[in-house]
Image (cartoon, helix red, strand yellow):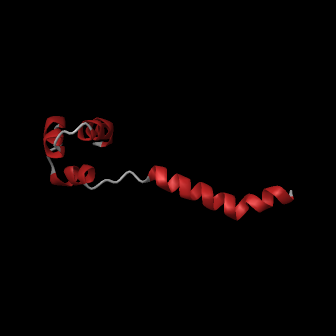
Amino acid sequence: MIGHLWEKFAARVKAGEDPGLVLDSLGVKKECCRRMFLAHLELIDAIILYEHRWFRSAYGDMERKS
């Protein structure tokens, strides 16, 4: 399992450290695990905003009619 390392990895890379060296120092050696960190995009904040806007546009009128 490697999910518990994400926050440390993201913080260090954001601070300017080389992603490969950060993964080495965290002990992430296997290519498949390294790929998960290097290819990950944090999209949850964008998705939440989109879902919220969609929900309001789709169901907002129903709330007013009730």
Determine the residue located farthest toward the bottom in the rendered image: 58
Q: Is residue 52 left or right of residue 37?
A: right
Percent position of residue 44, x then y: 46, 51
Q: Is residue 8 left or right of residue 60?
A: left
Percent position of residue 23, x then y: 18, 42
Placement of 15 over or under 52, stated as above or below: above
Residue located 28% across and 38% down the image: 5
Residue 2, image quadrant: top left
Closest to the observer, 45 or 36: 45
Placement of 54 over or under 37, stated as above or below: below
Residue 39, image quadrant: bottom left
Residue located 74% across and 58% down the image: 60
Placement of 7 over or under 36, stated as above or below: above
Percent position of residue 15, x then y: 25, 36
Placement of 17 over or under 51, stated as above or below: above
Residue located 18% across and 45% down the image: 19
Residue located 26% across and 49% down the image: 37
Closest to the observer, 39 or 15: 15
Determine the residue located farthest toward the right in the rendered image: 66
Q: Which quadrant is home to the N terminus?
A: top left
Residue 27, image quadrant: top left
Determine the residue located farthest toward the front in the rendered image: 16
Q: Which quadrant is home to the C terminus?
A: bottom right
User: How many numbered callouts?
Assistant: 0
Q: Is residue 64 left or right of residue 12?
A: right
Q: Is residue 13 left or right of residue 44?
A: left
